[in-house]
Amino acid sequence: MKYAILDCYTDEAAGLGVPSYLGTYPRYIAGFLNEPVYYLTIDDLRLWKKNNSKIKVTKPSQKTDILTYNLTKNYKNIAKIVDEIDTLIIVLGVHVPGKYLSAVPGTIKELIPLIENLNCKKVLTGPAVFGTQLFGGKFFEKYEKKVFDKIDLKMYKFNYEDIRDFSIKGASLLKQIPDIRMIEIETGRGCDIGRCSFCTEPLKNKVEFREKKDILEEMKAFYDLGARYFRYGKQTCFYTLPKVIDLLKDTRKYCKNLKVLHIDNVNPVKVMQDKDDSITKAVVKYCTSGNIAAFGVESFDPEVVKQNTLNTMPKIAYEAIKKINKYGSEIGDGGLPNLLPGINIIFGLLGETKKTNEENMKWLKRIYDEGLMLRRINIRQAAIFEGTSLYEKSKNVYLGKQRRLYWKWRNEIRQQIDFPMLERLTPKGTIMRDCYAEIYDGKTTFCRQLGTYPLIVGVKERLELKKFYNLEITGHMLRSLTGKVYH
Ligand code: SF4
């Protein structure tokens, strides 16, 4: 049997697989198949269909085509590969809609015309088995069963005993990717709180953690292949992992010259339960700068917290933000503070009223006025998935009723909090090291550091792409920066 894995990219509350990240699913599947397998991206397929696999050079007036930016080493041979294989395994699914600088995840709608005439078996797996949605505030997109020969849940969710072996074998997939990737590392699944009205994680997984040794051996396999950028991103709370401090310590022994080691989701409640603050101190000590503890606060309105059974009351979120600032706000090697909190805000939840954003603004202003820092505020509308209590209770109520307020609320946070916060975080003259030039938009090059939720810096010249630059910050936009090359 000959296989190809088609990565259409994935984004979930726990786990990112949109370039520059390489997600876990294609890697584990490659290890499971345990034989030579082609790794393809949706970009490879798009370029094949659109332009017969020939890369078009962008003119100085044009934007980089991010639909075909993330090609594998196989891109020139797609026609031959799809002819040769017996089975195409498609990894797809976006559950947490976002905007991506240099990639566009594939949707079911886009995928079908690309694959329906291929003469091989088509297997769909990834978060899409539960539906997918690229845009917030909408109901999920369901897969069309007739196009796929199989919807495979097993490949979406191997058990941790199997992953021990699959994850190491599957690391070799990296050899088929010509560009640098952040390697998303899984530490656990499920959520021990597990009641937030909009969240699919408790539906998908029971609470489980990977063994420290298994995680380290997987990282070592990648490290030996040249990977230097890692994020502990696939978990609902990094602080909940047993022996988490030992893991951080040992990572530095297994992988000595890491360029980036970051984390993702953290539950503010667990930050407050870390009595001697030892986990926070260890994250600051062993990870690299620019790191973020991303808190799923979702709302500072107590009524919304209650009705959606969210895990954090505003006061606890605030205390956890203070604690992370206390240990992490010092500037590190990369030019940004070592570790700062990030928060997620969701609109479109149950119990929302016209007063909801007043509550958000009250707490956010307090955070700002007290001189604290937030590295990012992620604002989105809830995507509504079947099986969640939000789906059961709300039906279409929010979408019809209060949607018009979303942009106003979002703007208030962006203008009054985000913007001054960004000025505080990266004052003019800040030198941000090792920014990777990713795309052009006319004469501007957009760069970012590799890492967790990196800040985008626009440089007013066409720098050679896929190279690193040190940048001096010259100004601030809403949610991004301007800079110039620092020599
Ligand atoms: S805390 Fe809530 S949002 Fe986070 S994983 Fe658990 S249920 Fe989902």
Image: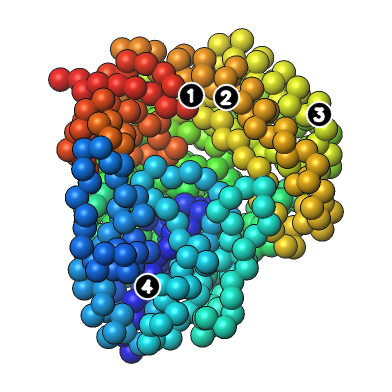
Q: Which mark is residue 414?
A: 2
**219 or 142: nearer the eye?**
142
Q: 331 above or below 30?
A: above
Q: Residue at (79%, 53%) from the top-left corner?
A: 396
**CA distance for labels 2 and 4:** 39 Å
Residue type at the position of mark 4: Ile
Q: Is residue 274 visible?
A: no
Residue that numbered label 4 is attached to: 5
Nearest to N terminus: mark 2 or mark 3:
3
Nearest to N terminus: mark 4 or mark 3:
4
Nearest to N terminus: mark 1 or mark 4:
4
**CA distance for labels 2 and 3:** 18 Å
Residue that numbered label 3 is attached to: 354
Q: Closer to us: mark 4 or mark 3? A: 3
Circles 1 and 2 in contact, beta carbons < 8 Å: yes
Q: Residues within 10 Å of mark 2 (few under 14, many from 20)?
A: some
Residue type at the position of mark 3: Lys
Nearest to N terminus: mark 3 or mark 1:
3
- Which percent across, then down, holds residue 170? 34, 68
- Which percent across, then down, holds residue 135? 58, 50
Q: Residue at (67%, 28%) from the top-left corner?
A: 408
**CA distance for labels 1 and 2:** 7 Å
Q: Residues within 10 Å of mark 1 (few under 14, many from 20)?
A: few
**CA distance for labels 4 and 3:** 47 Å
Circles 2 and 4 in contact, beta carbons < 8 Å: no
**Which quadrant of the figure has residue 7?**
bottom left
Nearest to N terminus: mark 1 or mark 2:
2
